[in-house]
Image (cartoon, grey):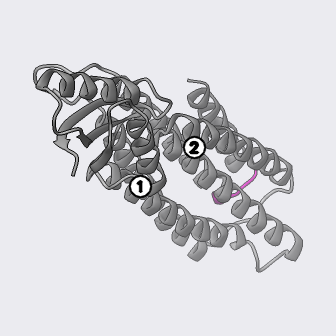
Amino acid sequence: MRGIALNLLLAVVKFAGGILGNTYALIADGVESLMDVFSSVLVWAGFRVAARPPDEDHPYGHGKAEPLAAMAVALFIFAAAAWIGVHAVHEIVTPHRTPHWATLPLLAGIVAVKWWFSRRMARAGEAEGSTGLGVEAWHHYSDAITSAAAFIGIAIAIICGPGYEAADDWAALVACAVVVFNGVHIFNRALRDVMDTAVPVEFEKEVRAVASAVAGVHGIDKCRVRKSGLSHLVDIHVEVDPELTVYAGHDIAHAVKDALVHSTLHISDVSVHIEPAP
């Protein structure tokens, strides 16, 4: 919620600065902040749905809601980039006054705030293994880039004087391309989660190591892991002594599941298949 409040405040500041300072780049930056507000609401809603426990209609939980929200954020980013690009071109071909110098310190402060918030969100996303928080971090980062581009364009327009009034509009156009690039990155990252792309090899090795450490496990045959929201679902084939009774094998399977669910790997459910060791 603090991110939403920050983006609302920055949007108001940018719109005011853009209108009073006669610079479309800052107004375009304000649109980007408004899009951040919508994206934050979507990510928050995705978290709320993803946190719901499994039910009759969703036996594997609601974890997909998080990457789906991230994909919606990416679509919002593409829409914002298109809006900024079209209006930037219009401003380039339309004569206008040079931006006011006071917009420069304003933009410098905005870049610093957004960069700090981006790094903070990125660390939170890495700690929680959250695609949604990672997307929010990238969105704040792209906002910082658009603000930095606006700063450079306005500085050129002010320093170079007459004939360079459209420099800030060109900066907005360049920032638009950066925003599109970040949108593609965000969309692809969310798509990987939706399509159940394999987790990193290192993570699978950790899963295998935890399962192998359980008493009675002779080896691990197959191990498949997919991300679901903030947690993971595991399908693992465990090799045990072929002379064990069904009850003994069942106990080992439960022990493997308990070990994985209670590990630090953020695993919410495990399907264990018992196989005879060769």
| Drawn side of residue 97 relative to residue 253, left or right | right
78 over 69 or under it: above or below: below
**Image quarter for residue 169?**
bottom right
Percent x, y of residue 159: 89, 71
Residue 248 or residue 99, whichever sits in front: 248
Q: Position of residue 69 (x, y in %)?
A: 35, 40
Report whether 114 appears left or right of 1.
right
Numbered tag placed on residue 24 in the rendering: none
Which residue is outermost to the right?
159
* Relative side of 210 to 51, left or right: right
Q: Any mark on residue 33, and which? A: 2
| Secondary structure of residue under mark 2 | helix
Residue 103 is covered by the magenta coloring:
no
Hey, what amino acid is under mark 1?
Answer: Arg
Please name the residue shown 74% across and 42% down the image.
Answer: 116
Counting residues from the N terminus, which is met first, the one under dot 2 or under dot 1? 2
Give the residue drawn at x 51%, y 39%. 133
Q: Give the label, 2 or 1, closer to the camera.
A: 1
Task: Give me the residue at 86% from left, 77% from top.
Answer: 160
Three-letter residue code for mark 2: Ser
Magenta segment main secondary structure: loop
Task: Give the residue at mark 1.
Answer: 189
Q: How many marks overall?
A: 2
| Residue 57 point in image, percent of width and height | 11, 25
Q: Which quarter of the rendered picture does the N terminus lie within?
A: top right
- Eyeballing the image, is 93 above or below 83? below
Q: Which residues are magenta?
A: 21-25
Q: Element under label 1?
A: helix
Q: Can you say whether 179 is above or below 218 in the image?
A: below
